[in-house]
Amino acid sequence: MKHARLGPVSALALLILALPVGAQQTATRVAPGSVPEFGTMWTFDAPPLDYWQARYGFRPDQTWLDHLRLAAVRLPGCSSSFVSEDGLVATNHHCARSCLAAVSPPETNYLRTGFLAETRDQEVRCPGTYLDQLVSIEDVTAEIRGAITTTTNAEQVAQRDAAVQATQTACEKESGLRCQVVALYNGGMYSVYTYRRYDDVRLVFAPEQEAAAFGGDPDNFTFPRFDLDVSFMRAYEDGQPLHPQHWLSWSEAGAAEGEAVFVVGNPGSTGRMLTLAQMEYLRDVTYPASLADYQRRLDVLRALSAESPDAARRYETTILGIENSYKATNGYLTGLLDEGIMARKAAFERDFRARIEADPALRAQYGSAWDEIAGAQLELATFAPQSRYYAMGGSTLLSRALTVVRLARQAALPEARRLPGWNAQALERARQGLSRDPSVDEALEIRQLTAWLAAARAELGDTDALVRVLLRGRSPEAAAETLVKESLLADAAQLKALVEGGIQAVDGCVDPMVAAAREVEAAASGYLKRAADLNTVISGNTEKLGQAIFAAYGTALPPDATFTLRISDGVVKGFPYNGTIAPYKTSFYGLYARSAEFDDRPPFQLTERWKMAETKVDLKTPMNFVSTGDIIGGNSGSPVVNRAGEVVGLVFDGNIEMLPNRFIFTDEVSRCVSVHSLAITEALRKVYGAAHIADELQRARR
Amino acid sequence: MKHARLGPVSALALLILALPVGAQQTATRVAPGSVPEFGTMWTFDAPPLDYWQARYGFRPDQTWLDHLRLAAVRLPGCSSSFVSEDGLVATNHHCARSCLAAVSPPETNYLRTGFLAETRDQEVRCPGTYLDQLVSIEDVTAEIRGAITTTTNAEQVAQRDAAVQATQTACEKESGLRCQVVALYNGGMYSVYTYRRYDDVRLVFAPEQEAAAFGGDPDNFTFPRFDLDVSFMRAYEDGQPLHPQHWLSWSEAGAAEGEAVFVVGNPGSTGRMLTLAQMEYLRDVTYPASLADYQRRLDVLRALSAESPDAARRYETTILGIENSYKATNGYLTGLLDEGIMARKAAFERDFRARIEADPALRAQYGSAWDEIAGAQLELATFAPQSRYYAMGGSTLLSRALTVVRLARQAALPEARRLPGWNAQALERARQGLSRDPSVDEALEIRQLTAWLAAARAELGDTDALVRVLLRGRSPEAAAETLVKESLLADAAQLKALVEGGIQAVDGCVDPMVAAAREVEAAASGYLKRAADLNTVISGNTEKLGQAIFAAYGTALPPDATFTLRISDGVVKGFPYNGTIAPYKTSFYGLYARSAEFDDRPPFQLTERWKMAETKVDLKTPMNFVSTGDIIGGNSGSPVVNRAGEVVGLVFDGNIEMLPNRFIFTDEVSRCVSVHSLAITEALRKVYGAAHIADELQRARR
């Protein structure tokens, strides 16, 4: 799964408002049997026991919940879990990619070859990798709110931040563990999450990248799927394998169709609290522009690739990457263009606003938020093309020209008068960026700039200042060729002199791109400042609405994802696709089929190990399966468990229909995709000669 | 492939207009390399040699074309070809269904078990089956047109029909063969097609229905696909196997990706000459109503099925059938809702109208046709719900009530005053229909009628006469229950008396449905007559436009399908689907995969033969493949040949994206689906113990 938008709790920038007393009493619990549109990323301190009881006839006790919480461990950017009494940790292959690259000896590439420790001696430490085990969750909302005594915005923020810091420090001092205050519902609720960290994590097993990501970019975000996206690590303590108190048994049977299953992991971030106006802006402005941009870049790269096999090889990875971004963005856009999805969102917003309107205190605090957001979005739309093109992203050199000019000008100003974000560190980062190897791919620069100039002229018009300054009456082709060929910005020495020479050097520079940037930088900064101001209005009101949701619904709606531990419920089931039905699972047969059906061409070629294993493996073995669990980037590697708490699979992606779930949860056709537990043990035994790991998984079931 | 709309040349009902001399000189050939929107169903007397040369670098000679034409043979409703020097004929399994049912001995069902003649002795004659080999095509346009000397409509039709008959008779007398005058371009061009008929056709081999139609209704109209939809027959002459002069070699390698291939077969009928107004009517009126009707019936059947396992079994086949109709109709509607497709159609219509407008003679003859069609469609739309509901199709009994009343009243009128279509034969057919077992499924009758009454009330309103007469102030549930339970029409004796008693019996009948039908039959006939008149306007102008197309473009555009032999070109290639890529072929692996992935449940279960053969077959064997050939119902069983004229597969279906090709040909994602030649020989040898047939196919290659 790419495009994970992960991250710890975001810095809260705005006003904290005390919740009116009793507001939570207006909350209603999710109707039993219905699917919550805000999804099912439940926190462990508010599990929806009644909902599960109604939906699955299953009401886990606290022991079951605690066991899952303590067996699950968070990796940087990913999820995982303990799966043996000797501290074995199961996660996705793509969560171990940086470790595989880091520990590959010079002559080998473990991403290509895979990795297997035959013995514990051969288990190799992953630099920088650690596991966070969630030991406890405590509601500290009253504590944080109580610390806020002033009425001015900036002071409230400072008091809140101080209270958060104090709470974390006190918690860490008392527990000797790591503590993090998590702002749920954009600050509607604060919880302190306490983690035990394990920082000696060693690589045990990973298949070849080609088997883990079989089908490559084409099959990414889709199902049916045939990926062994798994890796194993082991936690060590004091140089010995950890014996965790809680670890998950490996299911002998795997998931059956129709079975209820639970995903335990750390979803990164969702956009489910966006208002209709924000979604419309994404639909009508942001995403169409992104897609046009991707398309323009793809057209250029494909045209260049068609000119020589060498160019085709050079641009292949870039093309696949952009194609993937196109696919993801198009998936989001498809959701926003779906009238059914927008109607559901509109219905929710009506209910939400009605609840706020019905309570005078809530109305006074939150009632204007929707219209303020909508107004800001409308205004942003009026100069969106200008904001886009005046950032001068038309080519590497053009972008560099703007950075050179802006760096010189911003550096000459006192910090208070600088553009948003241009503090001392930002200046330093810009300088460092400009000190790297400045060489460029000239042919690509010219083509990209040509296409960008043509697009800018079409969108901004002939009379726009940026268009006039860059084209100076020439065709996009002619202008791009001259601008690129005459630029000094690809020369390290000249660039260095320019950066070090500050405003004087920039003002005297004869580079045509720098000259153009000098002329329009003030206008560009104007657009940037105006957009930043409007985005501040939006983010402030967005935070208000997060709090308003909590005030109106309480924990009946799970909070937006925060890359903290959640438990999502779902059912194992296929879905309608391609005019027929996608099965709930794929099989090893299907892996060999998809390879044969593409004549074993990349990215559908089988690795030698899999070719040799064909006669040994049971081809009926389930490979991947789908369920209606609610996941997003950050959930990678999450264990999928059955009612017995056994691992039936590891989440590694969603189908293409799941992309719109970023905005509103649906489960008619959207599915999360997991590696089946049996695929893992069968492949370990028959393909990878790793029976000892399969034995460790299957040996001691609880 | 279901929903084939097959049939010989339709009876032409309207005015024949002489083509202006020289009109064909305005024709332009299809631009080399472009895809003709009218598709690629070329006639053998106008092969697009320049187009093929430009597109594939392939310019077959007349010998190649003659060989294909003479090796291809038409079956009733299907296509096929000679594939051995001993008269072996290859076609689809579903083209042999009626033969399989007819020749099954009492204790066996060959549809279930399959059929294999181990020796020629065991080859069993298919009753009523014959093969038509197209011996020659001759343009008789001048002859038919020359026979029309009058200026009045009815006389022209009579003269034309007499000329067609005379031409056919003369041809048959001269050749001793079967002759058919085919009206291409709705009469823009007339050709006499001469056939040699082989009427001793014997069944040689058919697999089990479950293997031939693996995936059943869900997978119908889709790809990826895994069907062995093949059967073999043999032509006999004088009790001995025929040794045809022309038969197709079986390809040793099958089709490769990117290869140009040709489909030789008999497409039944297309709707590519429809005007935009006609397509809009289908989009806005016909198809939405059909889908609502299917949905209502499905809702009723599913609700009944949920009530008992017995009911579930009883309605299963009906449900699958309606689901299939829903899928097909929805596929057509999807095409009409596609703005890109409609824009292409609109662009064509603009070009076409401009050509007609540019020529005074053409404008005078054809210029008003579009607006007359559009006007009639608009008027039809004004009473479309009335036309639909006044046909009283709400249940079997209700429909029967209307038939009883109408039969009595029409029979009492002289033929000239009767409703369109109610000639003596129609009266007789109606009487026969009413003499069959009249028993009904009462529960189903009541539920269906309830749903239909509710829909009628919602669409027509409370004050509509039909609604008032049927409901009489009751709820749909109460009305339906009374109407069905009190009806006499399910009783054979009472029904017989009613039919035989004529108007008097009908007028005295106390059956509440008959009473209702008596009250509204006149109004119903009014709607019927009005619709028939408007449809006559439409069909007359549609014929004009067919001739106008020929006048404007000549044979640069292939004629609409007429269930006569065509050759379509295309390329073997996959297509984008499900967020990724569908391969150009499937494999035996994939068959076993799809079965395993549905846990071997119907319609994805493997037959015993295939289960047992798993270790014997080469799982890499290609199963089905896709190409951009242009096909429609009637093409079933068409050989797909390569440049060498070898059979690389047999067409048996299209993917779901091909359904809109009924209206306009596109090849971005639409594909025709064929059984791969290698799947057939591998299955014959390893699954069915029919090496002798594989040998016969592969033995003597030309």
Image: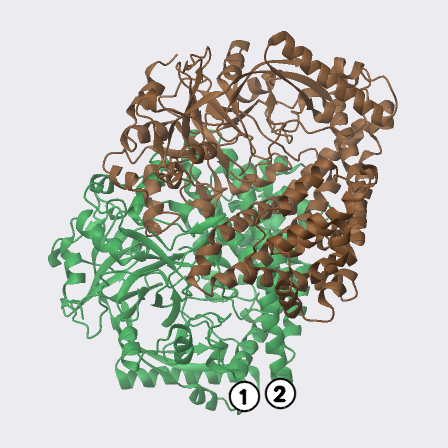
Chain colours: A green, B brown
Q: Amino acid at mark 1?
A: Ala
Q: Position of residue A361 (x, y in %)?
A: 61, 89
Instruction: Judge whether B254 appears above or below A685 on screen.
Output: above
Q: Nearer the viewer, residue B49 or A550?
A: B49
Question: Quadrant location of the N terminus of chain A?
Answer: bottom left
The residue that disc 1 covers is A23
Circle 1 SS class: helix
Which residue lies at the image location 44% right of the left edge and 56% below the top edge?
B313
Badge 1 vs badge 2, beta-carbon distance below 8 Å: yes
Instruction: Judge whether A230 appears above or below A156 on screen.
Output: above
Chain letter for the residue marked with disc 2 in the picture:
A
Question: Quadrant location of the C terminus of chain A?
Answer: bottom left
Res. B28 visible in picture: no
Circle 2 SS class: loop
Left or right, A498 with respect to A43, comes to right
Chain letter for the residue marked with disc 1 in the picture:
A
Q: Quadrant of residue B258?
A: top left
Q: Nearer the viewer, residue A56 or B194?
A: B194
Q: Position of residue B274 (x, y in %)?
A: 71, 36
Determine which of the numbered discs, if any, sits on residue A359 in the image. 2
Q: Amino acid at mark 2?
A: Asp
Instruction: Judge whether B202 appears above or below A605 on screen.
Output: above
